[in-house]
Amino acid sequence: MIRLLMRFLRPYFPQVGGVIALQLVQVTASLFLPSINALIIDQGVAKGDTAYIWRMGALMLGVSIVQVVGQVGAAWFGARSAMAFGRDLRQAIFDRALTFSSKEVNAFGAPSLITRNTNDVQQVQMLVLMTAIMIVSAPLMMVGGVFMALREDVGLSWLILVAVVVLGTIIGILASQMTPLFKTMQVRIDTLNRVLREQISGLRVIRAFVREPTEAARFDRANHELADTATRAGRRMMTMFPAVFAVMNLSSVAVVWFGAFRIASGDLQVGQLTAYISYLSLILMSVMMATMMLMIAPRAAVAAGRINEVLETSSSVVPPANPVTTVSRHGELAFSRVSFAYPGASQPVLEDVTFAVRPGATTAIIGSTGAGKTTLVNLVPRLFDATSGTVSVDGVDVRDLDPDLLWSRVGLVPQRPYLFSGTVASNLRLGKPDATDAELWHALEVAQARDFVERMPDGLDSAISQGGTNVSGGQRQRLAIARALVRRPEIYVFDDSFSALDVATDAALRAALANETADAAVLVVAQRVSTIRSAEQIVVLEDGHIVGIGTHEELVATCETYAEIVESQFKNEEVAA
């Protein structure tokens, strides 16, 4: 946690210095007030010196104003530093998460990444804020209070030692019990976020299978686990305050008891006893502020550890040290002896895959579920890196290309198209922010999406909800295709992007795409033979291996796997035709 604080608080060291200086001023003022009060009692009230009372009262008022100004100033600088720290930390987590490949995202999980960027940052930010407002003054108050109390009377000093030791022991025991509970609590928050996210995303599936009671029980279990852990931690936190006040009150009673004997013997005056009680209260108050630190610090330490896990995780897809920024070829994609295995898998998903996608031609990939089709296309934009072999774009290994250059040349329409909250236009302009409305309408027309966008209330400015949940699956796919068309890349990768379309729309879209992508290399992953039978090259995958490459007619005659796929989708007479 110290490393995290030093890294992200360094730009705000001047403000932190201001906090320390102002806290020193207000603590000094606080320590002088009991002494002034003692002088008023012993020199003014006891002797009936009204003028002295007025003079010291005015001084006391001035010191009180200084104390208030110092406290307010420290709180102002502290709040600004803490909020800026939290902002920078959230940005750092977000920036690091953007560099992650699918491997790291899957390892952490989206719910956990969200929790780390919100709740965990909030815990550390709260520690910074409370430290600036309260905790910085605690050691100053304790040391100063002990010095000033001994200055008033040394004979009662043993009471301070006993009170501090007793209170410190109680707090230490409680704090040691809270740390593991706070660690468990953050995990419980992750679990609750995951369950809630799954249930909201899969609401239609839950209703379709009448799983509402089961899912309600699942959420209730996760909710109760979090509540129980928080309750146990809360009980220990709440025990601290009664312990602090009990020790403070018992210590004050002891000071009055033993101080009365010293007053009777003439070793102590009434004003000094009053000041001593005030200093004892300040000392124990500083211990209570340290208690606040011990309440916040364990949870913040756990949160900081989780944040560091994200910040210290490097992407398995490493940007090239000396990236290639220019290429001479145009729209050529090649796979050379490519193999890929997921971490911990017993066998590779892809093995020794070799083929090329040429400009002006369409290459299709087909195969059974789990054959490795989506994994293969994910290697093109470097969502993963090949375990062995080479994926090259325009003759250059994608691992050597500048990432921006790679992404500018490849237009990927994923298997699960995702739309962002905003408008139709804002989603289409993701790949080309300066695209004109005419370009957007043209892309929509090619993608067979113009008709339903025109029927929307505001056309291009119609609202799209997060994930595109306010449009159908087929409309979502067509908008994703239009988004790729707006960018006009040199290589198009369609990962089963026509599965939600009816046959007529599929045929119309493929016919329109043929003209639009005439000069580009097109890689299509499909399940339907009708979608790809006109492709210049069809690659048949089975269990991660290529078992056939050729045209539709060639593969029907020579590739048993492809022939079985065709037979399962068409009647015999259609195959013969």
Image: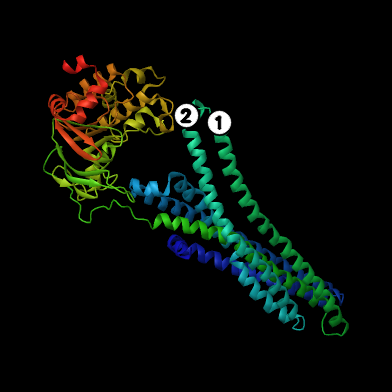
Q: Quadrant of residue 88?
A: bottom left
Q: Nearer the viewer, residue 235 or 406?
A: 235
**Which residue position is annotated with label 1?**
212
Q: Secondary structure at mark 2?
A: helix
| Mark 2 vs 1, N-terminal side | 2
Left or right of 251? Residue 330 is left
Crowding near the residue tagged with mark 2, few <14, some 14–19, many ≥20 C-alpha atoms within 10 Å? few
Q: Amino acid at mark 2?
A: Val
Q: How far across and down, in percent of the image, does residue 288 sit?
A: 67, 65
Q: Nearer the viewer, residue 432 or 203?
A: 203
Tell me what residue is drawn at x 39 percent, y 24 percent. Answer: 472
Q: Secondary structure at mark 1?
A: helix
Residue 302 in the image: above or below residue 419: below
Q: CA distance from mark 2 to mark 1?
A: 10 Å
Q: How is the image coloured?
A: rainbow
Label 1 near label 2: C-beta < 8 Å? Answer: no
Residue 205 is labelled as 2
Left or right of 278? Residue 442 is left
